[in-house]
Amino acid sequence: MKFLLVTQEVCPRCDRAKKLLREVQREVPFEWEEVDMYEMLDTFTYLGIATTPVLLLEDEDEDYTEEHILFMGELPRKWRLKEIIESYIEKYAEPEREAV
């Protein structure tokens, strides 16, 4: 499981979002990657997103829905982002395979 932080060059909140993700990552192990908004323009258009930053749960099939959006535009508080990420990790974690 990985999260995508969708940013654009002229976005003051995007730098704060990267800092916030690094802070939360010190407390909760998760992977994230920064992606330029223009790489996901079709997805943004489909979902009606017109702002950055956006944090998405990565979908390998690139079949994004509103359920994949953790936040967009305004940044949540650190404690709230930690809760959100933990809930996504819990919800989408692959069940551990039992040893045979």
Image: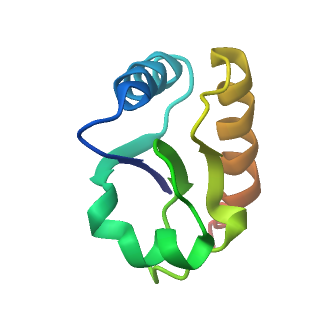
The spot of residue 30 in percent (x, y) is: 48, 39
Task: Tell which of 5 and 28 is nearer to you.
Answer: 5
Q: Quadrant of residue 13?
A: top left
* Residue 42 vertical position relative to residue 3 in the rendered view, above or below: below
Q: Quadrant of residue 27?
A: top right
Left or right: where 33 falls relative to 47: left
* Residue 76 vertical position relative to residue 88 in the rendered view, above or below: above
Who's the residue at 52% across and 47% down the image? 55
- Say whether residue 94 is visible: no
The spot of residue 4 in percent (x, y) is: 43, 52
Task: Tell which of 62 and 2 is nearer to you.
Answer: 62
Who's the residue at 76% across and 56% down the image? 91
Who's the residue at 63% across and 17% down the image? 78
Task: Tell which of 3 and 95 is nearer to you.
Answer: 3
- Say whether residue 23 is visible: yes
Number of numbered discs visible in the structure rendering: 0
Q: How is the image coloured?
A: rainbow
Location of the C terminus by quadrant is bottom right
The spot of residue 20 in percent (x, y) is: 48, 20
